[in-house]
């Protein structure tokens, strides 16, 4: 009993010494910026430059702020990756027990990821066919996969922007108000609020539960999107606007989509009051109070879909 008591006292004294030392050292962390930058680069796979480092306590955890982060683009790549600030909270007890830093919470503010130079469709096809994407695109995608799917377990993104190349080749910008992302090996959970950049539109609520088959270019799982009074036209490509003649529209919906190896196999849409206007020789207006639609891929026919609807008004 006395031995256990002495052991407990010793642990508490050591813990108190560690906490006291950290309280003294944390405000001085900017002096160790080169060492911290080396640690970040070693664990991220990117060569980051950090403008400033600061330490503080948050939620009883020793914490670290990395301010003004800019990643050097891989060779022959036009990718841009930067963050205004990254806050990292460390789990003190688990860090001591494992003798290495253990992150309790990671928040990324002002992330800007520009991957518009990457032809994602070509990269996906190169994984399953004889076609080859450019080596720089493949290398960049591999680094992105490693960082966001493998190195980071649980992180949040706030007030950020993603610039990417859509399937039709156009450049799209997506604002991320907030996004919570959790990785469990090859299984990934995501939930957040997004919208089209600079469009002053209603936001979309999104969530995902999927597995990656080695890359973000090959995923399978369930995806949910919800919106209220969403303007349709800013989300459409120029081609779709011209071909379908859509002039305006406003929709409210909840939708679920199932992907298998990046291909949709099933979709379920629950419409709330919505309206759509288009021109085909003359103007047409469609007003829906409510409705349920289901799209299913026909068995044995990869390009054939069946549509069923119910409760439409």
Image: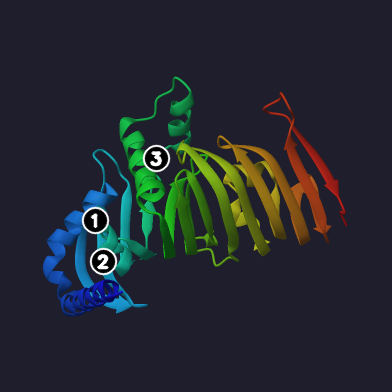
Circle on res. 40:
1
Q: CA distance from mark 1 to mark 2?
A: 10 Å
Residue 287: x percent and y percent?
82, 59
Outermost residue on the front side: it is 1
| Disc 1 secondary structure class | helix
- The residue under the point 25% across, 77% down is 9
Classify 10 Å Cα crowding around label 1: few (below 14), some (14-19), many (20 and above): some
- Circle 3 — which element? loop
Q: CA distance from mark 3 to mark 2?
A: 27 Å
- Using the image, determine if residue 141 lies above or below residue 269: above
Which quadrant of the figure has residue 35? bottom left
Secondary structure beneath dot 2 equals strand
Q: Mark 2 and mark 1 in contact (Cβ < 8 Å)?
A: yes
Q: Which comes sooner in the sequence, label 3 or label 2?
A: 2
Task: Quickly name the residue at label 3.
Answer: 118
Query: Where in the figure is residue 57, as x and y percent of width and height?
Result: 29, 78
């Amino acid at each position: 009993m006395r031995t256990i008591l002495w052991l407990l006292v010793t642990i508490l004294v050591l813990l108190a010494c560690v906490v006291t030392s950290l309280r003294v050292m944390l405000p001085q962390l900017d002096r160790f910026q080169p060492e911290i930058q080396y640690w970040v680069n070693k664990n991220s796979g990117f060569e980051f430059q950090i403008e400033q480092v600061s330490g503080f306590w948050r939620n009883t955890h020793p914490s670290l702020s990395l301010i003004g982060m800019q990643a050097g683009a891989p060779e022959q790549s036009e990718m841009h990756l930067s963050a205004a600030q990254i806050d990292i909270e460390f789990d003190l007890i688990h860090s001591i027990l494992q003798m290495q830093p253990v992150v309790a919470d990671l928040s990324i503010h002002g992330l800007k990821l520009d991957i518009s130079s990457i032809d994602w469709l070509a990269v996906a096809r190169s994984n399953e066919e004889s076609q080859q994407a450019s080596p720089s695109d493949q290398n960049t995608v591999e680094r992105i996969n490693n960082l966001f799917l493998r190195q980071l377990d649980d992180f949040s993104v706030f007030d950020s922007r993603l610039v990417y190349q859509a399937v039709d080749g156009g450049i799209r910008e997506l604002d991320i108000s907030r996004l919570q992302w959790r990785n469990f090996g090859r299984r990934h959970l995501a939930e957040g609020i997004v919208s089209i950049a600079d469009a002053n539109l209603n936001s979309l609520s999104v969530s995902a539960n999927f597995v990656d088959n080695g890359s973000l270019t090959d995923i399978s799982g369930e995806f949910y999107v919800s919106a209220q009074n969403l303007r349709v036209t800013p989300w459409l490509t120029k081609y779709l606007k011209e071909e379908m003649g859509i002039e305006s529209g406003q929709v409210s919906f909840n939708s679920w989509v199932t992907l298998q190896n990046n291909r949709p196999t099933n979709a379920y849409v629950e419409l709330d009051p919505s309206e759509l206007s288009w021109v085909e020789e003359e103007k047409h207006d469609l007003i829906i109070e409510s409705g349920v639609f289901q799209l299913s891929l026909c068995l044995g026919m990869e390009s054939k879909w069946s549509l069923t609807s119910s409760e439409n008004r």
